[in-house]
Image: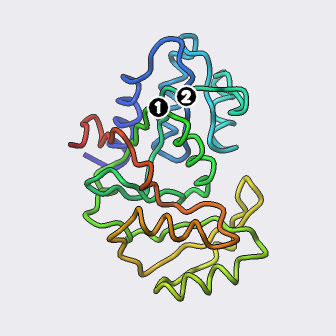
Amino acid sequence: MSKDEEKRLAGRAAMRYVERGMIVGVGTGSTVAHFIDALAERKQEIEGAVSSSEQSTRRLVEHGVRVLDLNDVTDIPLYVDGADECDPAKRLIKGGGGALTREKIIAAVARTFVCIIDAGKRVDVLGRFPLPIEVIPMARSYVSREIVRRGGRPVWRESLVTDNGNSILDVHDWRIADPVGMERDLNQIPGVVTVGLFAQRPADIVLIGESEMG
């Protein structure tokens, strides 16, 4: 099965967790685009969606799905998003699309986080995919020095400004044996907005194509 077909199947498989009257959190990326297309087919059944990026918001609006502001929502029963890497404990690296901060906020609010991926995103240890870190622009050099001190190799993603107006550093050469500890440590560096490790709040369910990961 091709990667694209796995993504399409995963996006559609996530619909089995969507219930009538729900507010659905919607992530960002190519796999999530398939979920949005499927969600649009049942848009009359849900109360609306909370979006993690301007990109996803545009696609939802184009499909006529009602988009809600998170500040107006007290409960998100379901959040569906993709990932760049997933380990056996369902801890993730996210942020390849640059939406990691809003994604992490919605994941924190959500009762159930369903992650949809293709098989190539599974790893035994996180870190093969460069770890995205969103930083305040004035702190970019300082945060980079702190990352180097921790053994990482930061690369500024010059082509991207996040939806929040910030910069992203992609950190190479890390084998992340303790994702929870690293997430906690990096969050303490002044100037770091969000770390693309979803380890303190991992996924609850991971779908690879139509199959649920054990």
- As drawn, the residue found furthest toward the left would be 214
Residue at 64% from the left image edge and 77% from the top image edge: 156
- In three-dimensional space, the C-alpha distance between marks 1 and 2, rounded to whole angstroms, equals 6 Å
- Determine which residue is flagged by label 1: 111
The quarter of the rendered structure image containing the C terminus is top left
* Kind of residue at disc 1: Arg
Q: Quadrant of residue 1?
A: top left
Q: Nearer the viewer, residue 40 or 2?
A: 40
Residue at 63% from the left image edge and 30% from the top image edge: 60
- How many residues crowd mark 1 within 10 Å: few (<14), some (14–19), many (20+)? some
Callout 1–callout 2 Cβ contact below 8 Å: yes
Of the numbered discs 1 and 2, the one sitting upstream in the chain is 2
The kind of secondary structure element at disc 2 is strand
Q: Is residue 187 above or below residue 46?
A: below
The answer to whether 180 appears left or right of 192 in the picture is left
Q: Quadrant of residue 13?
A: top left
- Determine which residue is flagged by label 2: 76
Count of numbered circles on the image: 2
